[in-house]
Structures are given as structure tokens and as C-alpha cells.
């Protein structure tokens, strides 16, 4: 590369047409080409000196083209159409002049093919203008504008690769974008990449790849938009609009052609080129049947084209998002519509929103799906359309379910996407939507619907982000949970506020705070996890969950050993423990390959395991209490030696081992599942092994120490420990059922919501958990009292019989 | 997920020190504040402009309200004095000049208020703390069209209740004043005296006119108060532009379906008093003024981008102004032309919105397009309050 294009300036001043153009307009006549040339030469130096930015010149060319089009529209109303035809041709000549002066030198050198396209389009437009053919002018305008974009793209990439990032950045200003949506702005990764090159943070080659990717994405979007516009124009019988869109579509294809040749093959790209040419010709001839046929053929051929290279992670993320959004359409719709009536407006609106979002996700993934199965992609597109129609007509939920199920099947089979919680970004996107819908309901005074949206949002949070945050940022995780529910740091949470029908301002403020923290969580989770960190996290999980089980079992086993109970006692505990470990391993395998454990299922299993543990602990604690405080424990110990184990005690000990271990094992499975989304597998397993070894060491130490400890204090400590755990499990088990939605949650504001209370004692500020724990305490007190009374009766009996014996002896 | 006492105790005893040293990050810290280039922007000028337009709107709605009260009092008086007669027929046959003059005045007041609103719409509709008033005054659909419509109630003087009837300007007052909704028509009459009753020639139904104009005036007063207490920020300014600039397509579509393009085949019951193009020029003027006052912020970070945005505004404003000028001069555009104009405007607007979004990003301003806006705690209920019956003259 031995020369540079005219460097686009950075001046803020604009030149709206050079001297010959202004003259020709003011005089209302066309100056001779020679005069134009002469004037052009005279002004050339000054033009170069103030060099209009490329984007500005291109914009002027576009505006002049559109003015020419307007003249031809006006010609249809005028008595003398030729005046307007001439005016249109003059405007196009002005456009040609700007091109020749400002852009052609660069284009000719760096994008000669584009230069040829532009000159051809200008010539076609001028001829058509003189002929009074508005459709032909429109088609040529479409070609002209897209050729300018094509040239700018070529210049941007050339400059970038030549190491002139400043010029590349300027040329990049002449570009188009995807259209922004209601909830998203258009970002500009291309400009950011070039800026990074300027700051030596990115190589030119890497930046060029980003720029090319970004522009391809934008122009493919525009191509599809132009194809859609053709359909609308044909339907409304707007020939000029149809021709313009056909010209644009052909031009966007031209920009993407090289990439299509590479990805679809030269033959397919060649066929497409022919199709676009035929499409344009058919539009100009107003042969609508041919336009439709050709447009359909193009759409089919483009179905498998992927303009933007998505990374495997991006594909997985978008696939998951598509799955979730599609699934949520029916979930919301079935509650929102009944018998052709909107029964719950917020659910209906959410269903509509999620369908729209599914469509956006599908657009990006369509080529990938089509690549796997072209018919499946077409069917999925049709299903999304049918869903929209069905829902807008308030059709039966069953009809929506049939469509959604079919769509999910296609998504699962073509993208291998499912409802797994691995994609946190998708979960955050859905959280945004649900919280937004919640606030809409609050604003309208529909608190019950808002509560429903809040619970849904929490379910999404807990099924994805929370699992991953639990270990990497446990404080943030707990804080977020509090913000969804009762509150945190003395501030009421959303559940409290909605239950109290708080003001819109208060709930909005609380949601804003929640969103801030959710954004932080999203940022946090988007950062990767190093191997070392993964190993440490893994070790903490197994230690935390495992130590809990080991300490309980160690206490029981120690007790059994200390009292010299027969080995059968211990064996039953080991048996229950082994069964629980086996079931935990099976749960891990099943969760990985067979089933998906939903949030509700998880809470139900956790709740059931906790309450079962309460029953077993209740039994064991009473048993211990009775042995230690009611009967003569030394006699008991002696009595047990060599005595066979009763069936009831055996089952209780096995049950204790099983429930305590499986409760922790199940949680461990879930935690490791979440960790595996972020952590390198080898490091994760390393942490697991190290943690397991430490647990075994602790278990051995406890067992060894238990032999040396005095028995009665050991029993007392063990009993208290079990009692405390049972109390905790009672609260947290009921709480799990509340979170699964099986039990209602009525807030008790007088109970402080404190992390320590929740973690150590299972005390939550709800009526149901409090009643359950109170019931547990009362039952415990009653059974202990009964045991004491029985003990005193026994002692009295013993005394009486001793006295009787004494009397008899006397 | 639950953690239990034993685990906590054991963990701290067994591993506390060594794990504390190498524990993973527990919780991210709060985001750091972005750079604050607001000092160079003149947000005060934006506030002055918005407050001025809101005050002018309020003055015009008060005048419109007075006219509607006078009109309703006249109809009430006729009903009282001539209970067997159709009051509108009586009014038109005995006081046509006064009725026409009053209707003309009310329409002029409506146009005045609506024009000042449109000049402010780019700002009000684009800023979360004010956007509620856009929905209530000008843009919100009725519940019959959208289950998520703004909830509010209008109670007429005769006790009839309209639940979530849409916005004041285009769903209530305009159709009432211009007779485009049958139930809001008192009597179709030959207002212009050309011998036939054409589009928009009707005496309004007095009750709906009274209630809707009184409601409009109250809503305008609230909007004025909200604008007066509003403290504009750079976020607001960028948000307004990014939100409102890409809506050109929608406005041009409404223009295409309005009587200004579709003639008697119009599908829009609103946008008959003034061309939707006038609204577009107003919206763009407000946004252009906003950008002019924050230009230094963009110029500081990217001079070229600032020039491109400024040029984009100039082109778009000029383009729509030219179109409106031609329409006012008598050009009747065909639907296909309107479609082409709309697409061209939308293309320009899309590009401009993308540039403004980039400028915001470069200036360190993050835009939350999903930010929830302000809305009242309870849905408003507005009840008409008629004056004593009185003669029209």
C-alpha cells in the first residue's frame, strides 16, 4: 500500500453541496458538464483543504438521491412531469459530482469494484430520472447507498490493516446499524475495537475481525429488513417501494457476498446473486408473483447463512435463552388467559413479552438451526408466528402449549439447549423482564399479580445465579435473597413491601436497589474462575457439607463406642451412611444425565430431608435423654453389653445415618453442579479429594477422642447438638417448603431477620416456621417431661420395692 | 442453601486461618462512579425550555376547559328550558354563530395546548420520571386496545364512568372536538357552510367534552408541577434522545393512516386537528435543543461523533420541516410517498440513535432503558364538575 485515501477530516463544519451544485440549484438549470468541470477544478483545492468527512459526503449523496425520488413522486401530480424529471436528473448529477470529488479517489484506489458499482448506479438513476421511471430510480438509489457502505467497509478494513487506525475510525463513521429495540440500544464493537488498536490494546488483525463481524451482523440485519419491506410493498401494491427495497437487498447481498461465498460455497453464492438480480428485475416489472417466488427462494437460501461468528459459549447462551423464553410463553399464558378472556393481565403481558424475546433470540440462531435442520428452522419460525397470532386472538392455552412443546423439541434437538441453569446471562435477562412486569403491576395497583411476578423472578434467580453465587459470593447471594423476600440490613424486602401494599415509590426504590445488586452479581459471575479458586471453592463445599454430617455421626458413633455397645449398633449407622452416599452419587449422575432438578423440586427434597431428619433426631435425642438422665446410665451401659440390638433402635440409627448424610449429600450435589458451570473439572475434583481427606481425618480424630472423653459430658454435648440441629432443621425444612410454594409465608415483623439466626438456628421471620419450631420445642419438652416423670416413677417404684423388701426383711 | 452451626464452627476451627488467606472473593464491591462531565452541559437551558412549554400548554388547557364548561352550561340550560328538544339541534338552529365561534376557539386552544406538548414530548416521554404524563396526556392507549393501559377513571357529570379510556389528547378531547368518534358527537353539522357535512364537522357531546377537558387541564397542571420540580441530569438528556429518536416510524405510520394522507379513508380517530408531521417537528425540536445543550460533553470525548450527531439532527429536522411545509402548502402525499418518507426518516433516526447511544457510552453514561418510571400510587379518578346552566351568549 503506497498511498492513503483522502483523510476524512474531523471538522464540525458541514458543506451542503459544493459551488456548482448551489449554482445549478439557484439558477434552476443544468450547467454544462464542461462548466461544471471547470468550476470543479477551480474549487478542488479548497474542497480538499476543508475535506468533507466521508460520512457527510455519503449522506449528502443519499439526500440528493431521495430528493430526486421526491421529484418523481411530484411528477405524478404535476401537469408538466418533465420539469420534475429534469430536476431529479440534476439532483442526481449533483450527487455524482460529490461522489467524484469527495469519495471516488479513495474508492477507486482501495475499492475499485465498489467504485464501478457506484458509477453504474448513478448512471442508471440519472437515465431513469430523465425517463420518468420512479421505480428504476428507487432501485438504483438502493444500489447506490449500499455501494457507498460497501466502499466504506473496504476502506475501514484496509486502513486498519495498514496500521492507520485514525483513518479507519473515520471511515467507519459511514455505516449502518441494527435497529435498536424498546429495551436495547445499538452498541458499536467495531468502533471500540479500533479505539483499542489506537491505545495498543488490540492488534490490527484482531480488530479487523471484530469490525468485519460487526458490520456483517448489521448488514445482514438490514438485508433481512429489506426483504421484509419487499413483502409489505408488494402487499400494498407500492411498486416504487418494492423496487427500492429490492435494490437495497441486492446491495446488502453485494456487501456480504464474499463472506457468503466462503460459508455457503461459491455455487450457492452465485445462485443467490442471480436471484437478487432477478428479484430486482421482477420488482421493476411489477411482476409480483415472480417477486414472491424469488423472495421465498432467497429466504430459503439465506436460512443457513451465519453472518456473525458466535463462540460456542455464545451459542450455548443464546440457545438457552431461546429455550427459556419459549418455555415461559406457555407458563405465563396458561395463567393469563382462560376461555378467550384475559384473566390475569400481567401473565398475559409477560407471555407476549417472552414470545417477542424468543423471536429476537431465534433471529440470531436461525442460521445455526437451519444448518442442523433447514426444515426445523422454517418450522420454528412458523411456530413463533402462529404463537403470536394465537395469543393476540386470546386462543386456548392448550393450543399455545402444543406450539410451545413443539418449539422446545426443535430447540432441544437442533441446539442441544435445555432448561439447565448453566446460562446465568439468560437468567438475568429474564429477571429484568419479570421485575419490570412486577413494577408495572404495582403501578396499576395489582399487588397480587406483582407478588406472582416476584415469586417467578425469585425462582429464576434461585434456579441459576443463586446456585453459582452461593459459593463465590455467599454474602451477596444471601443479601439478594433477602431483598427478594423479607429484607436485609433493616430494609424491607420486596415480599414484605408487596404484602404491606407499600407505595409505588417504595417498591420502585427497593427494586432499583435489587437491580443494582443483581447487576453486580451478573458482572461478578461473568468473570471466570481460576483453577486454584475452583479447587478452594470445591474443598470448602465438601468440608462445609461433609463436616456437618461427620460431626453428628462422629458424636453418635463415639457415644456407641464409649458405651461399648455391640458393633451392630455402629454397623447400622454405617449402613445408613453408605446408603446415603450411594444415593447422593446416584443423584449426581441423574442430575447430570437424566433429569433436571427444578427449584421447586430442590426445595421440596431439601424440606423433606430436613423434616425427616427432625423426626429421626427427635427419636434419637429422646433416647439419649432417657438413657442419660432417666435410667442409670452405668447400668444401661452394662445392660447393653452383649445385648442384641432391637429392630426399632437399629432402624433409628440407620435412619439417622441416612437422613443426616443424604441431606448434606443432596446439597453437595447441587453445589457441585453449580460449581461445575464455572470451574475447570480437574481443579474441582482436586479440591473435592483434598476436602474429603480432611473430613476423614476429622472423623477419625473424633472417634479417637471420644474414647478418652468422660461419658456423661459427651452425652450431654451430643444431645444438645442434636437438639439444636433438629430445631434448625425444623425451621429450615418448613422454610424450604415455603420457597417451593407448598406452604404460605406470613411475615412476623417482630422477629429480626438476621443471617446468624437463619444459619445457626433456622429462625426465619415467618409465622409458619416459628409455629413449627415452637411445636417442636413443646413436643420435645413434653417428651422430656414424660421421660423424667417415667424415670421418677421408676425410681419411686424401685424405692417402694426396696422399702417393701426392707420391710419384709425387717 | 443452608449452612449449619457445626459446619461453621468446624470450618472456622479446622481451616479458618489458612482458608481466610486464600478464600475467593466474597462479594463484589459497589460500582465506582463514572466520570462526571456534566459540568460543561447546560442542562438548565433544557429545564427552562421544558418548563416554559409545559406552562404554555397549561395556559391553553385552562382556556380550553373554560370553553368546554361554557358549552356544557349552554347545553344544560337548553335541556332545562326545552326538555323535549334535542339540545344540540336547538343550539345549532338558534345559536349557530355563537356555537361555531365557541367551537373554533376551543379547537384553537386545543391546538395550542397540543403543540406546546409536542414541543415538549421529546423530553417528557423520554425521561422515566416524567414519562407517565406522556402516556396519560398524549400517547397511552385505552384499556380496550391494551391490557397494560394506564389505569385511571373519568367520571362524567351524569355519573357515567370511563375506565382507562386512553390519553386525553388523542383518545378523548380531539375526537370529541373533531367528531371522529360517534359516541362523542352531539350533532353532525355543516360547520364550514359548504352545503355538506364533511369530516370533523360536528358539535361535540357536551358531557364527554366537559369531563375530558377538565381532566386534561388537571393532568396538565400535574405535568407542569412535575416538570418544575424535575432536576435534569445528563442521564435524562441522553435517555430522552435514545428513547425518542427511533420512534419516527411510529409517527409516520400514524401520519400515513391519518386523514392528512388517507383522506376520508383515514383509520386514525386522532391526529385530525393537526398533521402528525407537526408533532414530529415538535418532538425533534425538543430533542435537538437538548442535544445542543449537551454537545460539549460529546465534543469532549469525540469531536467527529459530535459533528455527526449534530449533522444528523439538522438533517432530520430539516427533512421533516420541509415535508410539513409542503403539506401545509397543499401537497397531498400518496400513501406510497408517505411510506417512503417514513422509511427514510426512520433510517436516519436509527443511525442517529445509534450515534447518540455511542456518545453516551463514550461519555461514561450508562443508559438503563428498562428503568422504571414514576407513576402515582393509586390510579387517578377524575370527576367532572359542571357549572350552573347558562346561555351561550
Image (cartoon, coloured by chain):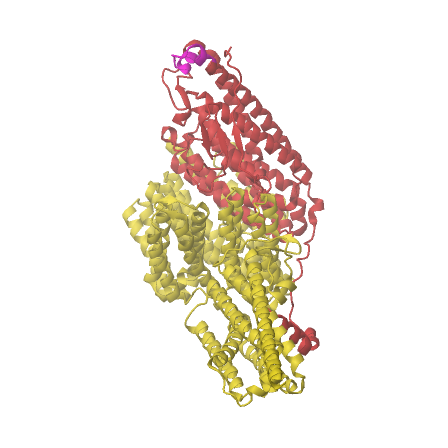
Instruction: Let me know if residue A796 is in the magenta part.
Output: no
Q: Nearer the viewer, residue A703 or A16?
A: A703
Q: Is residue A705 left or right of residue A141?
A: right
Measured as percent of width and height from the top left, residue A208 is found at: 54, 63
Q: Give chain A's shade.
A: yellow
For the point 32% across and 56% down, the residue is A297
Q: Nearer the viewer, residue A516 or A71?
A: A516
- For the image shown, how many numbered marks are present on the structure? 0
Most extreme residue toward the front is A810
Measured as percent of width and height from the top left, residue A135 is found at: 37, 42
Most extreme residue toward the left is A289
Q: Is residue A528 visible?
A: no
- Residue B180 vs A569, above or below: the answer is above
Measured as percent of width and height from the top left, residue A503 is found at: 59, 43
Measured as percent of width and height from the top left, residue A82 is found at: 39, 33
- Residue A413 vs B87, above or below: the answer is below
Q: Dividing the picture into quarters, in which one does residue A525 lie? A: bottom right
Q: Magenta stretch mostly in which secondary structure?
A: helix
Magenta region, residue range: B77-92
Q: Is residue B362 left or right of residue A402?
A: right
- Residue B166 vs A145, above or below: the answer is above
Q: Dividing the picture into quarters, in which one does residue A537 lie? A: bottom right
Q: Where does the N terminus of chain B fall, quadrant-wise? A: bottom right
Q: Give chain B's shade.
A: red
Q: Nearer the viewer, residue B195 or A5?
A: B195
Instruction: Let me know if residue B85 is in the magenta part.
Output: yes
Q: Nearer the viewer, residue A129 or B331?
A: B331
Q: Is residue A478 left or right of residue B175?
A: right
Q: Is residue B254 left or right of residue A470?
A: left
For the point 30% across and 45% down, the residue is A285
Q: Is residue B379 visible?
A: yes
Amino acid at each position: 500500500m503506497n498511498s492513503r485515501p483522502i483523510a476524512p477530516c474531523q471538522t464540525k463544519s458541514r458543506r451542503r453541496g459544493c459551488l456548482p451544485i448551489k449554482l445549478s440549484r439557484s439558477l434552476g438549470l443544468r450547467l454544462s458538464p464542461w462548466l461544471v468541470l471547470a468550476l470543479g477544478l477551480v474549487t478542488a483545492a479548497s474542497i480538499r483543504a476543508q475535506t468533507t468527512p466521508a460520512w457527510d459526503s455519503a449522506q449528502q449523496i443519499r439526500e440528493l438521491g431521495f430528493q430526486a425520488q421526491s421529484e418523481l413522486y411530484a411528477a405524478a401530480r404535476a401537469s408538466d412531469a418533465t420539469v420534475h424529471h429534469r430536476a431529479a436528473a440534476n439532483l442526481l448529477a449533483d450527487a455524482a459530482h460529490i461522489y467524484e470529488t469527495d469519495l471516488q479517489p479513495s474508492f477507486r484506489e482501495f475499492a475499485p469494484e465498489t467504485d464501478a458499482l457506484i458509477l453504474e448506479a448513478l448512471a442508471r438513476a440519472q437515465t431513469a430520472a430523465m425517463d420518468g421511471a420512479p421505480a428504476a430510480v428507487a432501485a438504483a438509489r438502493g444500489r447506490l447507498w449500499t455501494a457507498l457502505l460497501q466502499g466504506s467497509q473496504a476502506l475501514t478494513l484496509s486502513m486498519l490493516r495498514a496500521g492507520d487506525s485514525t483513518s479507519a475510525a473515520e471511515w467507519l463513521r459511514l455505516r449502518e446499524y441494527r435497529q435498536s429495540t424498546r429495551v436495547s440500544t445499538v452498541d458499536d464493537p467495531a468502533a471500540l475495537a479500533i479505539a483499542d488498536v489506537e491505545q495498543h490494546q488490540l492488534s490490527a488483525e484482531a480488530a479487523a475481525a471484530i469490525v468485519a463481524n460487526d458490520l456483517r451482523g448489521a448488514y445482514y440485519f438490514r438485508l433481512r429488513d429489506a426483504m421484509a419491506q419487499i413483502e409489505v410493498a408488494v402487499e400494498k401494491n407500492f411498486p416504487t417501494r418494492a423496487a427500492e427495497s429490492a435494490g437495497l437487498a441486492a446491495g446488502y447481498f453485494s456487501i456480504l457476498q464474499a463472506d457468503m461465498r466462503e460459508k455457503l460455497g461459491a455455487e450457492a453464492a452465485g445462485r443467490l446473486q442471480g436471484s437478487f438480480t432477478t428479484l430486482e428485475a421482477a420488482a421493476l416489472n411489477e411482476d409480483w408473483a415472480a417477486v414472491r417466488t424469488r423472495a421465498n427462494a432467497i429466504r430459503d437460501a439465506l436460512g443457513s447463512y451465519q453472518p456473525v461468528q458466535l463462540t460456542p459459549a455464545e451459542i450455548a447462551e443464546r440457545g438457552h435463552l431461546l429455550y427459556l423464553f419459549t418455555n415461559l410463553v406457555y407458563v405465563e399464558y396458561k395463567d393469563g388467559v382462560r376461555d378467550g378472556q384475559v384473566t390475569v393481565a400481567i401473565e398475559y403481558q409477560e407471555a407476549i413479552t417472552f414470545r417477542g424475546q424468543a423471536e429476537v433470540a431465534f433471529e440470531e440462531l436461525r442460521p445455526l438451526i437451519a444448518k442442523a435442520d433447514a426444515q426445523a428452522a422454517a418450522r420454528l419460525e412458523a411456530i413463533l408466528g402462529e404463537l403470536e397470532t394465537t395469543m393476540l386472538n386470546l386462543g386456548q392455552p392448550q393450543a399455545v402449549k402444543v406450539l410451545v412443546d413443539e418449539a422446545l423439541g426443535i430447540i432441544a434437538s437442533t441446539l442441544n439447549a435445555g432448561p439447565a441453569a448453566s446460562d446465568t446471562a439468560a437468567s438475568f435477562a429474564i429477571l429484568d423482564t419479570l421485575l419490570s412486569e412486577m413494577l408495572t403491576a404495582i403501578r396499576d395497583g395489582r399487588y397480587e399479580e406483582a407478588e406472582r411476578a416476584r415469586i417467578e423472578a425469585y425462582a429464576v434467580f434461585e434456579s441459576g445465579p443463586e446456585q453459582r453465587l452461593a459459593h463465590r459470593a455467599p454474602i451477596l447471594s444471601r443479601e439478594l435473597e433477602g431483598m427478594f423476600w423479607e429484607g436485609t440490613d433493616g430494609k424491607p424486602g420486596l415480599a414484605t413491601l408487596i404484602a404491606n401494599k407499600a407505595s409505588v415509590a417504595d417498591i420502585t426504590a427497593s427494586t432499583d436497589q435489587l437491580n443494582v445488586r443483581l447487576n453486580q452479581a451478573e458482572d461478578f459471575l461473568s468473570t471466570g474462575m481460576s483453577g486454584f479458586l475452583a479447587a478452594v471453592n470445591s474443598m470448602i463445599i465438601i468440608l462445609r457439607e461433609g463436616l456437618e454430617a461427620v460431626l453428628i455421626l462422629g458424636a453418635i458413633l463415639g457415644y456407641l463406642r464409649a458405651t461399648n455397645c455391640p458393633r451392630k449398633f455402629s454397623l447400622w449407622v454405617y449402613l445408613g451412611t453408605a446408603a446415603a452416599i450411594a444415593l447422593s452419587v446416584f443423584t449426581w449422575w441423574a442430575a447430570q444425565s437424566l433429569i433436571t432438578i427444578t427449584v421447586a423440586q430442590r426445595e421440596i427434597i431439601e424440606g423433606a430431608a430436613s423434616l425427616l431428619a427432625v423426626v429421626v433426631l427427635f427419636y434419637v435425642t429422646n433416647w439419649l435423654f432417657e438413657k442419660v438422665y432417666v435410667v442409670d446410665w452405668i447400668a444401661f451401659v452394662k445392660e447393653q453389653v452383649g445385648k442384641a440390638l432391637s429392630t426399632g433402635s437399629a432402624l433409628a440409627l440407620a435412619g439417622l445415618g441416612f437422613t443426616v448424610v443424604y441431606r448434606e449429600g443432596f446439597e453437595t450435589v447441587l453445589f457441585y453442579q453449580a460449581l461445575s458451570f464455572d470451574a475447570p473439572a480437574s481443579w474441582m475434583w482436586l479440591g473435592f479429594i483434598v476436602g474429603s481427606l480432611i473430613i476423614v481425618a476429622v472423623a477419625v480424630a473424633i472417634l479417637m477422642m471420644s474414647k478418652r472423653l468422660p461419658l456423661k459430658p459427651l452425652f450431654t454435648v451430643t444431645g444438645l447438638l442434636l437438639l439444636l440441629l433438629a430445631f434448625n432443621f425444623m425451621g429450615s425444612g418448613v422454610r424450604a417448603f415455603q420457597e417451593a410454594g407448598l406452604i404460605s409465608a406470613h411475615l412476623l415483623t417482630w422477629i429480626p431477620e438476621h443471617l446468624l439466626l437463619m444459619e445457626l438456628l433456622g429462625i426465619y421471620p415467618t409465622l409458619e416456621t416459628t409455629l413449627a419450631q415452637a411445636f417442636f420445642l413443646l413436643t420435645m419438652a413434653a417428651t422430656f417431661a414424660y421421660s423424667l416423670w417415667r424415670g421418677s416413677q421408676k425410681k419411686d417404684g424401685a424405692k417402694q420395692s426396696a422399702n417393701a423388701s426392707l420391710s419384709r426383711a425387717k | 442453601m443452608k449452612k449449619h452451626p457445626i459446619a461453621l464452627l468446624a470450618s472456622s476451627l479446622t481451616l479458618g486461618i489458612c482458608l481466610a488467606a486464600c478464600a475467593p472473593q466474597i462479594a463484589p464491591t459497589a460500582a465506582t462512579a463514572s466520570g462526571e462531565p456534566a459540568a460543561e452541559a447546560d442542562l438548565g437551558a433544557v429545564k427552562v425550555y421544558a418548563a416554559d412549554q409545559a406552562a404554555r400548554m397549561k395556559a391553553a388547557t385552562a382556556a380550553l376547559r373554560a370553553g368546554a364548561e361554557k358549552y356544557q352550561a349552554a347545553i344544560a340550560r337548553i335541556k332545562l328550558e326545552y326538555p323535549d328538544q334535542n339540545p344540540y339541534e336547538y343550539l345549532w338552529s338558534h345559536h349557530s354563530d355563537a356555537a361555531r365561534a365557541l367551537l373554533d376557539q376551543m379547537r384553537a386552544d386545543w391546538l395550542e395546548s397540543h403543540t406546546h406538548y409536542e414541543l415538549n414530548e421529546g423530553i417528557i416521554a423520554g425521561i422515566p420520571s416524567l414519562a407517565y404524563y406522556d402516556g396519560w396526556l398524549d400517547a397511552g392507549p385505552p384499556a380496550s386496545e391494551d391490557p397494560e393501559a394506564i389505569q385511571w377513571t373519568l367520571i362524567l357529570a351524569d355519573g357515567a364512568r370511563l375506565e382507562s379510556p386512553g390519553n386525553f389528547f388523542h383518545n378523548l378531547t380531539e375526537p370529541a372536538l373533531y367528531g371522529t368518534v360517534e359516541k362523542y358527537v352531539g350533532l353532525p353539522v355543516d360547520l364550514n357552510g359548504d352545503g355538506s357535512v364533511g369530516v370533523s364537522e360536528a358539535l361535540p357531546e357536551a358531557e364527554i367534552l366537559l369531563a375530558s377537558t377538565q381532566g386534561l387541564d388537571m393532568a396538565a397542571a400535574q405535568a407542569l408541577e412535575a416538570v418544575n420540580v424535575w432536576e435534569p441530569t445528563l442521564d435524562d438528556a441522553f435517555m430522552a434522545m435514545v428513547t425518542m429518536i427511533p420512534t419516527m416510524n411510529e409517527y409516520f405510520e400514524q401520519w400515513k393512516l391519518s386523514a392528512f394522507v388517507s383522506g376520508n379513508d383515514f383509520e386514525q380517530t386522532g391526529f385530525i386537528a393537526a398533521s402528525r408531521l407537526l408533532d414530529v417537528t415538535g418532538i425533534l425540536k425538543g430533542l435537538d435543543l437538548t442535544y445542543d445543550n449537551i454537545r460539549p460533553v460529546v465534543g469532549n470525548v469525540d469531536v467527529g461523533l459530535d459533528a455527526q450527531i449534530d449533522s444528523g439532527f439538522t438533517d432530520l429536522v430539516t427533512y421533516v420541516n420541509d415535508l410539513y411545509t409542503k403539506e401545509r402548502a397543499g401537497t397531498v402525499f400518496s400513501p406510497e410517498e408517505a411510506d417512503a418518507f417514513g422509511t427514510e426518516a426512520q433510517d436516519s433516526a436509527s443511525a442517529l440513535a445509534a450515534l447518540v447511544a455511542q456518545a453516551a457510552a463514550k461519555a461514561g453514561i450508562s443508559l438503563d432503558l428498562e428503568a422504571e418510571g414514576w407513576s402515582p400510587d393509586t390510579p387517578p379518578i377524575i370527576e367532572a364538575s359542571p357549572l350552573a346552566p347558562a346561555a351561550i351568549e
